[in-house]
Amino acid sequence: MRNLSKQNLEDIIMGCCYLGSGGGGSYEAGLKRIHDDLAAGLKFNLMSVDEMKDDDYAATTYYVGSTAPYTPEQIERFNKLPRIKDEATAVAFRLLQKHVGKNFVAVIAGEIGAGNTPYALSTAAHLGIAQLDADTAGRAVPEIDQSTIFAAGISLLPTAAATVFGDELLIIKVATPSREEEFLRIASTISMHIAAADSALPGKLLKQPNIVVQGSLTLCEQIGRAYRVAVESQKDPIQTVLDASNGYKVFAGAVSAHDWADKGGYLVGDVEISGAGPYSGQRYKLAFKNENLISWRDGKVSITSPDIITMIDNATGRAVLNPDFRKGQEVTIIGIPAPSPWRTAAGLRVCGPEHFGYDASYIPIEERHRTGNI
Amino acid sequence: MRTLAKQNLEDIVVGCSFLGTGGGGSFTRGMQRVYEDLQAGLTFKLMSPEEMQDDDYAAATYGVGSTAPPTDEQKQRYAKLPHIEERSTTAAFRLLQRYMQKNFVATIAGEIGPGNTIAAMSAAAHIGIAQLDADTVGRAAPEIDQNAVLASGLAITPAAGVTQYGDEMILPKVATTSREEDLFRAASMVSMGIGVADTPLAGKDAKRKGVLVQGSISHAEEVGRACRAAIETHQDVIRAVLQAGHGYCLFEGRISGFQWEDEGGYLVGDVDISGSGKYQGSTFKIAYKNENLVSWRDGKFSVTCPDLITMVIKESAKAISNPDFEKGQEVIVLGFPSPPNWRTPRGIELFGPKHFGFDTPYIPIEQMQWT
């Protein structure tokens, strides 16, 4: 276990941008959250999965938001309700802990993303426990189904949920796994948003391979540090980020077109880049549902989920989060190998290109690179 | 504890119809349920709160429906889900029991009404436990706020909800009482309804004065029995009902007008009666929100909630359910004193005329000046 300094935390958030595959929440919001917590005197501790005792527990917490706007009548009702002082994620986590009745030592991050991973870190700091150096995706993902725990066939239940008004809810059992999200979503429509805690698992299980993505926060930190050091020493940050992430540079050019829309709460769209330098004359295209999921070079599949596809702004060397690109922007596309839990048959079922409706089969990026099929 | 015979149950339904103040669910459905359950070999038991051990528990159980019809996409998705074998209310009651790790011996009725009290008793019969001779209102009432347990300062959580598909959830606590209803209604919208169990009460609280309305089911039975006995012996049925229910005759006449509409799931309206016989030349008006709430005689406030106002058909002496009346119909208006639970400052705040927006103080029916 180690205490994270402000610099460590900032490195982690910067690293999250590259592993976010274009999503994962707002970098500025993530940074602000951590700065606010540090200013309030909160401590951040990072604990490796191996440091957990077999019968210690960790769990994830997250917010489920409503995508539909609230009516004035709803807002009036919300305004009449009391508000809790605590962070709702912390309330949900404590409720889960009380219900499960075990010793909870750490928070598991739900994904790696610049806005969302700091949420987990912040919840852990508010609870006064550690952040586990692990998450359930190893990247940012669009749907609740993309949980490595879920892919491993382990039930995420029981779920504890808390509203900002002080309501507490436990989901003990569901008819099918998707019902959990269905209940949380419908509850969020009458609650602004709702904080949930689930995936309460013992150290014994978490230490097994492919249950969670282990070491993912440390990896973020290394990537973030590589970026920072390169900038400080006036080196090419894209190259150091590639080195730190075992990534591949696949394309460079200028954004020539983009198209996106809000579809049922998801940001769905695509962006086209026309090649420059060694890629001159080529066209590259990315498609995203919150996160970048698939890319094509001159109409041929280049990289697909679960591998990570990230756009980098050439001028700053920083990852571009969807939809913050603009026409004419000079960018580089990099691909980063997916964490191992996604490369299993069960992982690909929920995170492979077919799951997202693309007629493409998953070929690992290393393989694509080796065969020139990228 | 006693086992209720068919006749006892019929008396209860009839009695509830007089105490339901125009609401409380369908009389026909209540009777149907009694016959269906008896036919299925179920046993109805009534247990007084005094018979509970201090650490025994009782709880209310009921169904919460969705207010919006399911979409085609939802219907398709729900058709693929598994179904549990027992009723969702039974499953919710068992879940609450499991969650609280207590010995649950009886169900508590949510109100006294011809359809709803029987629904609670039927749930008890299905679970195979007793119905407590008590309820949380002592009459029928429109809102979740009109709950004597809440008025006494106790919480109605933890609450358990189970869907017909076997989804199980617990509300350990809620921000305000109406949030329980909101959250379960939300869950019911993605489940075509949900069975709920709440208001877990320990025997020591159930026995305490002012928490539940005690003896309310036997009281309904007495009113129903008085009605039946009067019919059988060709006596004045209304007089017998008033005597058994300690009530008053408020008015008699013909229905001269009415209006009602659906307001956010509530049946809201009023009915005008023009007097006949000794009331010739006078008018009477009743306003209701599902249940009859306030009345006016010649434009001046008469009996108000929490006291009971019930309209009966003069010819048959049957209680009228809102809005099943017609113009020209000859009716008699009865009034009954509310249970003592509602005659406290907190009770009047939750169930007095001002709570429903009528600008008049509550005057107990016994203290009214009759002309």
Image (cartoon, rainbow, N blue to C red):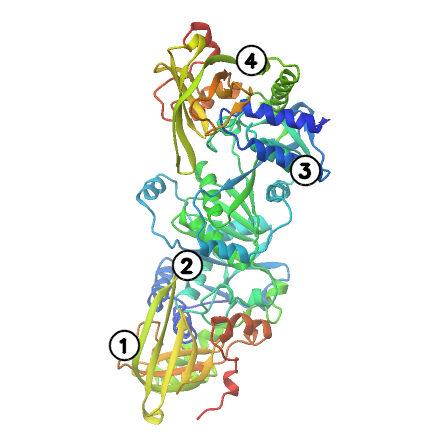
* Residue A67: x %, y % from top left: 44, 42
Q: Which of marks 3 and 4 precedes in the sequence?
A: 3
Tag in front: 2 or 1 = 1
Q: Could you tell me the amino acid type at mark 2?
A: Leu
Describe the element under mark 3 as helix, strand or loop: helix
Tag in front: 3 or 2 = 3
* Residue A312: x %, y % from top left: 51, 20
Q: Nearer the viewer, residue A142 or B19?
A: A142
Give the CA distance from mark 3 to mark 1: 67 Å
Discs 3 and 2 lie in a common subunit: no
Q: Could you tell me the amino acid type at mark 3?
A: Asp
Q: Which label was assigned to residue A37?
A: 3
**Would you call the spot at circle 3 few (<14 residues within 10 Å), some (14-19), or many (20 or more)?**
some
Considering every residue shown, the one lying at the far front of the view is A328
Q: Which residue is mark 2?
A: B42
Asked whether the viewer can see residue B208, the reply is yes
> Which of the chains bears the disc numbered 3?
A
Q: Which residue sits at x=60%, y=35%?
A: A119
Q: Which residue is mark 4?
A: A246
Describe the element under mark 2 as helix, strand or loop: loop
Give the CA distance from mark 4 to mark 2: 69 Å
> Which of the chains bears the disc numbered 4?
A
Describe the element under mark 4 as helix, strand or loop: loop
The image quarter containing residue A51 is top right
Tag in front: 1 or 4 = 4
Give the CA distance from mark 4 to mark 3: 32 Å
Q: Nearer the viewer, residue A125 or B252?
A: A125
